[in-house]
Each structure stands twice: as structure tokens, then as C-alpha cells.
Image: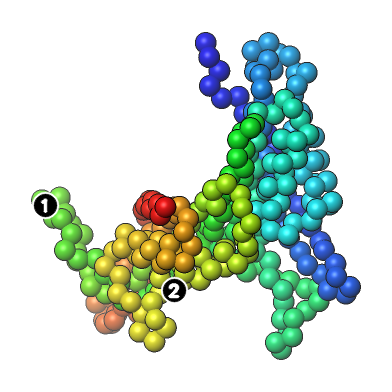
Amino acid sequence: LKVLNCEYGKNTIKFLRLHREGKKHFVKEVEVCTHLRLTSAHEYLDGNNSLVIPTDTIKNIVLVLAKKNGIPTLEQFAIDICKHFMTTFCQVAYVKTYVQEVPWQRLHENGVPHIHSFICVPDGIRFCEAEQCRNGPLVVFAGIKDLKLMKTTQSGFEGFFKNEHTTLPERHDRILCGELFCKWSYGECKDFDFDCIWNKIRECILEAFSGPPDCGEYSPSYQKTVNSIQMLVLSKVSQVIETVLNNTFYNVVDMKNLGLTNDKEVSKCSKHNLPGLFRHTQP
């Protein structure tokens, strides 16, 4: 028998990193998962643990790196973790780490930023991954997930294939709503401004989804909306991109039996959770 994969690691290492600049405080609350693959599988095959780095040690290393290096960006922190395991432990053949951030934003009072108070704003969760094989390049991915978007018009679904099993009516004016996941690759790690790129991609997502603020832009399908997001992102940042939009349908409530005319003012939510997965690569 051949061992195909014997990775192990520590999941859900959750902690808060506080940085002070005088009276002003900065916070990063993150969740980290770090997995390793060793140069041998003796611990699996023979019960020999002599090369095994305990998962408690992995956790402690992540916390120490956060203390010593801080978290300038999620991507840089993931890079620091991978580099530490590769340079410190010769028995590590592969390392992969995942980091996601709790979306804390500085609290403002009458337009004035507070020096040490924050509010959690669920407008998309930032995450990243970094991985490296022994003697191989360090590769970095980044993304945004759980970004909930809605537009109440300028969306429809018409002209689709129909047969004897089709009961779905065509709709030329509907609510478009979904929860978006978007992931891109930086390839081999270079000198990137990770914060700038992440913010730029988020802006592209919002712009492509909604269209111009005074009139919007018609979406003929979820698929076309995802493609529009990808094309706008790729016009600004030349990376591989993967986008998933999980549908949430809103069906207009029929109120005729109640003696009322419902002009699409009251709708019931029906979350179908239908993923649309599209990949596009720009050299």
C-alpha cells in the first residue's frame, strides 16, 4: 500500500492581535489553520512519532509569530508562518496555512474616528491561503467570502430551455440576491500591496454587481452577473479568479385572497443555495 496523503495540523487557532501607536489602537482578530506533511510517514505506518511536530506546538508557533511580527496583512502573516516551518524544521515537506479575519472596523462618533473602539461589520470576510513544498515556490491565494449582495430590480431570467418538465415562469423584473465567494491567486509571492489589491477587487465586485448608482445595470442571469464581476476584476488585476454566487430567491406573495394587490412589495425568501462556479485565467 502507498500512503497518498498524510497531512495533519491545527485548525481554528483563534486570537486577537492588538497593536498600539500611542493612544490609538489597531486590532486584527483572526482564525488560523496550519497543516503539515512530513518527509516520511513513519507516524502513520509504524507509530514512530520522532519527527512529529505536535499540533499544540503548531498553535504556539502561530501565536508567537503574531506576537513577534504582528499581522501587517493576512497574506504576509500566512507567508511568515509558511517560511517559519520550512526554515525551522527539516522534516517538513509541505506546509499550508489558511487565515481569515473577523471584520472589525473602527467606530466613528460624529465623523470622528475613535482611538480604541470598534464595531463588527459583516460586509464580507477576508481570507487568504499560503502553501509551499520543500524546494518549491511559496504560493499565495486571497479572497472574500460571505459577502451578501442584493438589488431589488434590473434583474430577470428569460429565454431559458423549456420542456414538459418546466414549471418555472419567465421573469423580467426580480430581486437578485446572493452570498458571494471570490478567490484569486498571487502565484509565486512577489512584492504585492495586498491591502490595495484586496480593496480594489472588492470595489470591482460591488460595481459589477450593482451597475451605475443612478440606474443600475440589467442582469439576465446569475451566471452573467458572476461573469461581469470576473471580467471587471480581471481588467484591473491580472490574476486567476474563482467566483461562486449562492442564490437567494425572493418570491412575490400572492395577496389576492386577502383583497390586496401586491406590487412586488412583499416577498418571501427561499434560499436555494445554488452555486455557480466559474473560472477564468488571464496570462
Left or right: 135 in relation to 238: right
Q: Secondary structure at mark 2?
A: helix
Q: Residue furthest bottom?
A: 110
Left or right: 275 in relation to 167: right
Left or right: 23 in relation to 153: right
Q: Secondary structure at mark 1?
A: loop
**Residue 24, x across and y down, in percent:** 83, 74
Q: Which mark is residue 163?
A: 1
Seen at 63% across and 32% down, the residue is 135
- Which image quadrant for residue 223? bottom left
Seen at 65% across and 50% down, the residue is 99
Asked if residue 84 shows in the view, the reply is yes
Of the pair 95 and 115, the residue shown nearer to us:
95
- Figure coloring: rainbow
**Which amino acid does the dot numbered 1 rest on?**
Asn
Q: Nearer the viewer, mark 1 or mark 2?
A: 2
Seen at 74% across and 27% down, the residue is 90
Q: Is residue 75 above or below residue 91?
A: below
Residue beneath label 2, please? 207
- Which image quadrant for residue 249? bottom left
Q: Residue furthest left?
A: 164
